[in-house]
Image: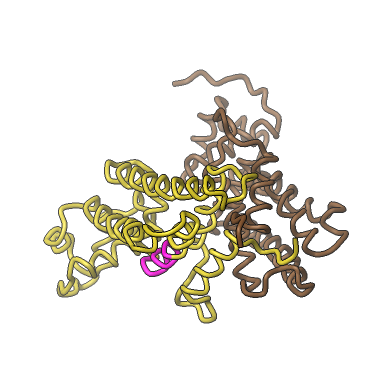
Chain colours: A brown, B yellow
Amino acid sequence: MTMARRDTYTPESLLAVAVEVFNRRGYDGTSMEHLSKAAGISKSSIYHHVKSKEELLRLAISRALDGLFGVLEEPGARQGRAIERLEYVTRREVEVLLSELPYVTLLLRVRGNTGTERWAMERRREFDHRVAELLKEAAAEGDIRPDVESRLATRLLFGMINSIVEWYRPERGGSASSEEVADAVVRTAFAGLRTTP
Amino acid sequence: MTMARRDTYTPESLLAVAVEVFNRRGYDGTSMEHLSKAAGISKSSIYHHVKSKEELLRLAISRALDGLFGVLEEPGARQGRAIERLEYVTRREVEVLLSELPYVTLLLRVRGNTGTERWAMERRREFDHRVAELLKEAAAEGDIRPDVESRLATRLLFGMINSIVEWYRPERGGSASSEEVADAVVRTAFAGLRTTP
């Protein structure tokens, strides 16, 4: 038996531990017992902070969604030509994904087995829809190539952005900075990798 | 108890059932019992075809890898300027991914808990490395924009391609054809979505 650590957690620091365990074991595969072990405090101490495992999930997902939706309210996402707003949102979305990496990773892996998961998927679809609308607007203004259908373009753009959670490891030396990754995504998606026509 | 169906499976058709279950439940979460139920034949009938669950995994992964590595041996991947070979490989890789969708999906989700999974990950890294080399060659020939680092460009390219398994559903009406998806990937990744500089 491990000696329980004195509970010095804040809601934020307990959440960080829970998200790490959720991402490692999967949300379904995580019990309150696993969380208690990882945090080094008793289950009743955890219940002092939150009502349930699902509440921890909701708090974590909210943090990711607040970051992503927040981008859409920034001036760069609301002013100017649609293509400029779309590039701005793409860049900022990559930055939020990297600064909130464990939280966004959890959001992207959610599968829909509980009410909170279904709510997360619904909000994520809503976000994707907002970006898709921006892309359509840019297409209508003639700034997006007409030979890639909007829905497909949106999916490939999100595919590129969301794949970052699969390989980006901030702790690894030599990893690209947040700004370098955001630049690379914007350049690749909007200007393409090819220098020659 | 369900009545066992008469075993009319070939190794190929049994494999198709197994891959569907692996993708739905996860490889770790699938038992021979689950496979027996899904196939409607007894466990001993399954053992008549294969030695173990891991052998089914190996056969399925081999099918995906044979398709992907096969592309690298095609004339379009071996002749011409590196950028042309890279675009050819990208297009064909998308086509193989779509024609072998369940097998490539399984390959991309493998996590490394068994010897077969570790071998799959090793072969996948080898494939990624071959494409990364092609991209580096194209960069050295001045055909890839110098302001996106090769490693990052390779990851974003694979991110875009591999994300297809998350949203492409061939059975859904109105889904883009294999050729449309391949065209969209090549145009987006190499020429970019923007029409205006």
Residue at position x 29%, y 58% in the image: B66
**Which residue lies most toward the left here?**
B48
- Could you tell me if residue A115 is visible in this image? no
- Could you tell me if residue B63 is visible in this image? yes
* Count of marks placed on residues: 0
Residue at position x 14%, y 58% in the image: B47
Residue at position x 41%, y 45% in the image: B129
Residue A91 position in % (x across, y down): 72, 50
The C terminus of chain B sits in image quarter: bottom right
The quadrant in which residue B125 appears is: top left
Report the side of B36 relative to B51 (left or right).
right
The quadrant in which residue B68 appears is: bottom left
Q: Main secondary structure of the magenta part?
A: helix
Q: Which residues are magenta?
A: B92-100
A138 or A142: nearer the eye?
A142
Residue A138 position in % (x across, y down): 76, 68
Residue B38 position in % (x across, y down): 29, 66
Relative vertical location of residue B113 with respect to residue A73 in this rendering, above or below: above
B131 or A41: nearer the eye?
B131
B42 or B109: nearer the eye?
B109
Residue B151 position in % (x across, y down): 53, 42
Whether residue A179 is in magenta: the answer is no
The N terminus of chain B sits in image quarter: bottom left
Report the side of B14 relative to B94 (left or right).
left
Residue at position x 55%, y 59% in the image: A112
